[in-house]
């Protein structure tokens, strides 16, 4: 089993990677682009961050900067023209909001997976950096006490057993941290096909019924 | 302003104002002498006052005094100290004038004594003059005969030494803690007539005990009986001075017990008689010869002998655990346990493990195994024939021909005359 990496992954970085590479987000984005093409929308008026889609119509009430502000999926908004284009606007925005939903859910999954990963990482690190060395130090001191006939051989052996148990616990924690790492990697890719939030990926079929 | 005249004639201890101590203190207070060595300081003759034959304090010294208007003035400073228990171990104790026990106070029957006690401990204290006949208000019992001496304050005790003998001083304020931390000292009041009970060499020490966990420095003050350091003058063998004696000398050895248990003090090579107890001199008709004298808690004993037999004579407490240093009383007996096979298995788990105790514990005296920090070996010391396997309350009375009168320097090991030593039978 490889040793623990020197530093844990950062949450913001994990979210950024996920937004870039998750398959469900990419699919929803393709869906949005296809929608625009199908509707013949060409005259871009401005770009907005779909993760702050409220900004399309109104500013956020408190105008606060939220966590994850640096992460964005920028989409174009178009010149909707007159009222005849209202349907096209609604369809386009529906696809945009579906993209947003997918992205929000994806980030939620990543955060969940990251927290599980971080707890497992911290536990393994605590065993490696604190508990195992402390146990070793206690064992060293116990041996010195045994040398001085301050304790007997049974206490020495019992302590040695405790030391072995602490190393086993570290190995278990290390294993758990690699499992959590694998779960996080999975979350960064998204659950292809079998995802609980697979609705967006399924959308192209349903949403494109009118193609 | 409190004047010296007002002190004299007071029947209770008087307190000096803080300002007086710091400002006029230099003139008012005698110097609080200290010593920077843990081996005995050979005594000098008294520079003034009535003549006497001074005592020798093992691993210690006697406090100097200042004569002022017919009073002998001493200054004791109660304070935290460090004391080397033996080479390789230092204890963080409380004591007087830089050491535990404090300096021995020597004076002469009939002396008027004024003792300044400055408290530099983190809590209040008093000094009780154990065995001295004095006015009740000078007895030093906190709350009963005086208010405790607050931190940073100086109290003055004044009394006349009405009789000669062997005494001690120790706190009577938070007494259990302060004695467990090492606060005590010896007092010798010499007879007014220097020829009375005259001896050539007069040794004194206090018997004390500490419980200092292996790897630590400060005594466990709440221990009642299971101490792990049994000391004389807060020193353990081989850190205790030898008692160096010239053949033919009349020798007196005085000791007081401030531990929590009795100590049968045994000396090899001689029979002796107890000539002085905490109550005074023992009349000749009341003495009997013996080789071990038990000193109970809070008692003092002094025995005398004529040093007729040269040699290195062991002197120790005869409770054999008291001639050991820190040890584990719960360590299982391994004598007779068959270790074949098991040692290798344990070694796989604990590489530095060694079998110990399967043939007794004498290995401990020979091997120098790494021990916890600041911890003395359970049995240690080396003599001319090998490991001495001792610790705690053990030292050697070294009787030699032709030493100088005031010579207390270690003469080395005894050279046994031909044919006077145990030998191996060779068939």
Image: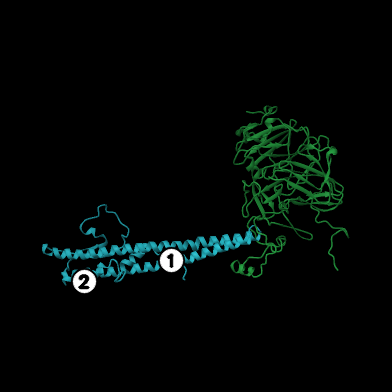
Residue that badge 1 annotates: A176
Residue at figure coordinates x 84%, y 58% from the top left? B415
Q: Nearer the viewer, residue B28 or B365?
A: B365
Above/below status of B352 relative to B247: below
Q: Position of residue A169 (x, y in %)?
A: 49, 64
At mark 1, the secondary structure is helix
Q: Nearer the viewer, residue A97 or B426?
A: B426
Q: Nearer the viewer, residue B408 or A29?
A: A29
Marks counted in the figure total: 2
Chain colored green = B
Q: CA distance from mark 1 to mark 2?
A: 39 Å
Residue at figure coordinates x 61%, y 69% from the top left? B345
Q: Nearer the viewer, residue A71 or B240?
A: B240
Q: Position of residue A45 (x, y in %)?
A: 19, 63
Of all residues, the one furthest to the bottom in this rendering is A211
Q: Which quarter of the figure is the C terminus of chain A placed in?
A: bottom left
Which numbered tag is attached to residue A205?
2
Relative to A194, B418 lies left or right: right
Q: Earlier in the sequence, mark 1 or mark 2?
A: 1
Residue A75 figure quarter: bottom left
Relative to B51, B178 lies left or right: left
Residue B47 figure quarter: top right
Q: Position of residue B308 (x, y in %)?
A: 87, 49
Q: Which colour represents chain A?
A: cyan
Q: Position of residue B287 (x, y in %)?
A: 83, 41
């Amino acid at each position: 089993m490889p040793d623990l990496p020197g530093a844990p992954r950062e949450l913001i970085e994990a979210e950024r990677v996920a937004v870039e590479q998750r398959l469900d987000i990419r699919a929803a984005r393709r869906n949005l682009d296809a929608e625009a093409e199908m509707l013949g929308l060409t005259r871009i008026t401005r770009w907005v961050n779909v993760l702050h889609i409220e900004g399309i119509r109104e500013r956020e009430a408190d105008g606060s900067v939220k966590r994850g502000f640096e992460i964005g999926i920028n989409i174009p908004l178009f010149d909707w023209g007159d009222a005849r284009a209202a349907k096209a606007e609604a369809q386009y925005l529906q696809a945009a909001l579906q993209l947003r939903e997918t992205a929000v859910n994806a980030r939620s999954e990543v955060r969940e997976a990251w927290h599980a990963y971080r707890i497992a990482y911290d536990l393994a690190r605590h065993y490696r950096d604190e508990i195992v060395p402390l146990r070793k130090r206690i064992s060293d001191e116990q041996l010195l006490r045994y040398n001085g006939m301050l304790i007997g051989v049974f206490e020495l052996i019992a302590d040695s057993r405790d030391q072995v148990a602490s190393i086993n616990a570290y190995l278990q924690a290390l294993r758990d941290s690699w499992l959590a790492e694998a779960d996080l990697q999975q979350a960064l890719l998204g659950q292809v096909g079998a995802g609980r939030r697979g609705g967006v990926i399924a959308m192209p079929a349903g949403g494109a019924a009118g193609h | 302003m409190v004047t010296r005249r007002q002190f004299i004639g007071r029947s209770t201890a008087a307190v000096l104002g803080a300002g007086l101590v710091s400002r006029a203190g230099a003139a008012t207070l005698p110097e609080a002498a200290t010593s920077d060595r843990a081996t005995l300081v050979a005594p000098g003759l008294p520079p003034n006052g009535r003549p006497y034959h001074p005592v020798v304090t093992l691993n210690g010294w006697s406090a100097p005094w200042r004569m002022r208007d017919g009073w002998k003035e001493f200054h004791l400073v109660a304070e935290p100290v460090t004391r080397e228990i033996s080479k390789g171990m230092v204890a963080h104790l409380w004591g007087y004038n830089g050491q535990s026990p404090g300096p021995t106070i020597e004076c002469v029957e009939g002396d008027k004594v004024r003792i300044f006690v400055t408290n530099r401990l983190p809590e209040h204290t008093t000094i009780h003059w154990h065995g001295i006949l004095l006015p009740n208000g000078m007895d030093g019992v906190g709350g009963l005969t005086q208010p405790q001496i607050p931190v940073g304050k100086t109290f003055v005790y004044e009394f006349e030494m009405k009789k000669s003998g062997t005494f001690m001083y120790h706190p009577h304020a938070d007494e259990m803690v302060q004695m467990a931390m090492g606060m005590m000292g010896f007092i010798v009041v010499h007879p007014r007539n220097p020829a009375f009970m005259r001896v050539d060499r007069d040794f004194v020490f206090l018997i004390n005990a500490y419980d200092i966990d292996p790897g630590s420095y400060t005594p466990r003050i709440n221990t009642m009986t299971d101490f792990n350091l049994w000391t004389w003058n807060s020193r353990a063998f081989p850190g205790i001075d030898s008692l160096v004696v010239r053949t033919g000398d009349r020798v007196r050895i005085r000791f007081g017990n401030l531990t929590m248990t009795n100590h049968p003090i045994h000396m090899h090579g001689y029979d002796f008689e107890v000539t002085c107890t905490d109550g005074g001199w023992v009349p000749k008709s009341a003495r009997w010869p013996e080789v071990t004298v038990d000193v109970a808690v809070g008692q003092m004993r002094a025995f005398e002998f004529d040093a007729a037999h040269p040699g290195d004579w062991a002197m120790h407490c005869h409770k054999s655990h008291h001639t050991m240093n820190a040890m584990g009383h719960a360590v299982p007996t391994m004598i007779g346990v068959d270790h074949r096979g098991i040692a290798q298995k344990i070694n796989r788990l604990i590489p530095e493990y060694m079998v110990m105790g399967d043939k007794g514990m004498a290995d401990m005296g020979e091997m120098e195994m790494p021990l916890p920090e600041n911890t003395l070996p359970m049995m240690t010391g080396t003599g001319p024939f090998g490991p001495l396997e001792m610790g705690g309350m053990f030292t050697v009375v070294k009787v030699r021909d032709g030493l100088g009168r005031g010579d207390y320097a270690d003469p080395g090991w005894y050279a046994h005359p031909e044919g006077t030593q145990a030998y191996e039978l060779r068939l």
